[in-house]
Amino acid sequence: MTAADAEPGMVARAASAAPEADVRLAALPCLPFADDAFDAVVGNFVLNHVGRPREALREVRRVTRPGGRAAVTVWAVPPAAGQALLGRAVRAAGVVRPAHLPGLAAEDDFPRTEQGFAGLLGAAGLTDVACSTVTWDHRTTVEEWWSGAAAGVATIGRIVTSQDPVVVAEIKNHFESLCAEFTGPGGVLILPHAALMAHGRA
């Protein structure tokens, strides 16, 4: 098995958990692998974090041998209620996306729908493309879910951590209030999620 990640800590953790694997520090759209290197390539939510998803998918296609399969996932838009929780808290505090965190350029963006995501794979040169929506309830705690944003994880975390401490505290207060909608027995936070899973043949 071969894997790649852009975060050194994740590379170290993966290498420790699976010492038999070839784990590389690398990021799309520049993978350190030869053309047609793999029978199967999987990218789990990586396209949410690249500035040029179309270019990234062409790189996935490049390293997949002819006849091989590539499978990728992204979050669906509009997001499921659980995924929207942190964003709702940020908006309730009156916070807008900072200018230093621009979104994708129009030419790089695509509809986060089954049809839109399938079209992205087709444009990258994959054939026999299929896309479906996967839904589930993510179970966590209020403290655990907030900890990611507080540590700057993903775009929503970077928005939170770019605020001054008073605003961060206000966001957290709104977050804790909104969590009541999703709190189940024993204080477990039950957050509905939805993702798009697409695959195609190289």
Image: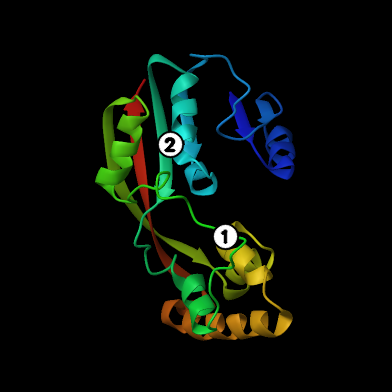
Point 59% across, 86% down: residue: 173
Q: Which residue is mark 1?
A: 155
Disc 2, SS: helix
Position of 6 with respect to 90 (left or right) is right
The nearer-to-camera label among 2 and 1 is 2
Question: Where residue 182 appears, x then y in whole percent?
Answer: 43, 76
- The residue lying toward the viewer, choosing from 137 and 58, is 58
Residue at x 71%, y 33% (from the top left corner): 15
70 relative to 114, above or below: above
Residue 18 place in picture, x, y as percent: 67, 31
Q: Amino acid at mark 2?
A: Arg
Precedes in sequence: disc 2 or disc 1: 2
Residue at point 71%, 78% (across, down) = 164
Q: Is residue 100 above or below residue 20?
A: below
The residue under the point 53% across, 83% down is 94
Left or right relative to 55: residue 77: left
Residue beneath disc 2: 54
Give how far across and how far down residue 34 sits, in percent. 57, 14
On screen, residue 98 versus residue 195, left or right, reads: right
Q: Amino acid at mark 1?
A: Thr
Q: Residues within 10 Å of mark 2 (few under 14, many from 20)?
A: many
Q: Position of residue 86 (x, y in %)?
A: 51, 72
Q: Secondary structure at mark 1?
A: helix
Is 74 located above or below residue 121 in the figure? below
Q: Quadrant of residue 64?
A: top left
Estimate the spatial distance between the alpha carbons at disc 2 and disc 1, rounded to whole Å: 19 Å
Quadrant position of residue 22:
top right
